[in-house]
Image (cartoon, rainbow, N blue to C red):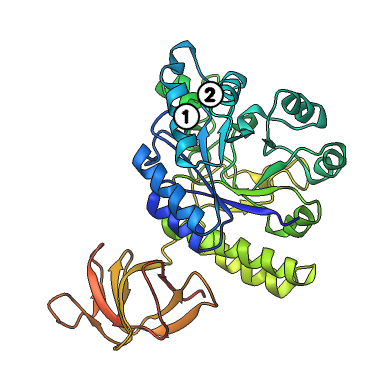
Amino acid sequence: MRTELLAPAGDLERLKVAIVYGADAVYFGGKQFSLRARASNFTLENIKEACEFAHSYGKRVYVTVNIIPHTGDFEGLEDYLKTLESYGVDAIICASQSIMKTGKRVAPGMEYHISTQQTTLSSAGIKYWQKLGADRVVLGREVTLQQLKEIKPKTDMPLEVFIHGGMCANYSGRCTISNHLTNRDANRGGCAQSCRWFYHLWQDEQLLDRDDGLLSMGSKDMCALDNLENLLKLQVSSLKIEGRMKTAYYIASIVKGYRYAMDCYYEKGHITEEELKKAAGLLQLAENRETFPGFYNGQFGREGQLYTSDNTVTQTFLANVLEYDEQTGEAVLEVRNHFEKGDRAVVMNPQGDEVPFVLEKMLDEEGNEVEIANKPMQRLRVKVPVKVNSYTFIHSERK
């Protein structure tokens, strides 16, 4: 059995990027019944197009219906689920037994996956959901590798685990900090990520702030690359990347990194140190927070926390490719970060190795030569060393 690589999609553009860069399945939320309300999310028309596009590549589509519903949240649910089924959605990710039971009754053609919001961390919990008719369980991020090794032989239920992305200050999203501080319900789509804010620290009347900045409750992001081979050997059904609010460039680099490492494993049964290093380089392109292995190596301490605000957003992403002329070898780029004539850049295509090149000549839309690209969304024509397409990204050379 080959383990599925499951990628997030905040909109249709990012869904297509995830698929062409190697995801086996994608997940996203609709405009209703989904967490991550601030993600772009998909209209019904988008969902239909997403299914058609993904299925044309032989990939699967999962839609999150993962709110923790209150009494008034069920209106329109049955019609919504029937519509998703008619469009060819492969599975629903839900956190509510009532939503799953409703779906099983009115839209039985879809699978029903139990969300990480249920914090399932034991074979007993998996057995409970299996008896209720669930088709897959997404384990909580808090599961360790040792616990997973103990759980896996005790169940035939397909299991999904997280391998990359944001962690939560509470058990798998069961958090009410956002509710208290902003009146935005984290379990009904409104999480303000309050744990990542920066705070003054007081004890009674004494201010305990550090000299180097305010304090945060947020953790580092998870990166399970070093445990990837162990997870593949356990034959979990799916490895999940978090990040429905991340950029297309982030999705491309993270998916490509894990896809490369997974393909290496399936080609010869293991991943070499050199291959892990290459995969890690791709993952690091889009990092904007430090990473750590999450709970896979056991309970973590200070090494998993951020505490201060000394992380900086990476600016390796230079441009999108909008057009390519095979006759001239020139591409039209859409500028995203500052670069200059003479800088070394890298072509990242969906397939193949990255290709470095020098930005020797840049022309604007009027044909004028440009020395510095510092206007976001500006279009420039440049010579590139390989064939590219609208899914190609240009980033700076790693140092």
- Near-viewer residue (297 or 52): 52
Amino acid of disc 1? Lys
Where residue 305 sits in the image (x, y, percent)? 62, 43
Per the model, the C-alpha gap separating discs 2 and 1 is 7 Å
Q: Residue at x 53, y 52 (%)?
A: 289
Number of callouts? 2
Where residue 193 sits in the image (x, y, percent)? 47, 34
Amino acid of disc 2? Val
Which residue is denoted by mark 2 in the rendering?
Answer: 106
Does residue 259 appear in this view? yes
Where residue 276 sits in the image (x, y, percent)? 69, 68
Mark 1 neighbour density, 10 Å: few (under 14) some (14–19) many (20 or more) = some
- Near-viewer residue (105 or 148): 105
Quarter of the view holding residue 138:
top right
- Residue 191, compared with residue 156, is above or below; it is above
Mark 2 neighbour density, 10 Å: few (under 14) some (14–19) many (20 or more) = some
Q: Are dots 2 and 1 in contact, CB under 8 Å?
A: yes
Mark seen at residue 82: 1
Q: Sequence order check: which comes first, mark 2 or mark 1?
A: 1
Q: Residue at x 45, y 17 (%)?
A: 73
Residue ranking furthest to the left: 366
Q: Residue at x 87, y 40 (%)?
A: 150
Mark seen at residue 323: none
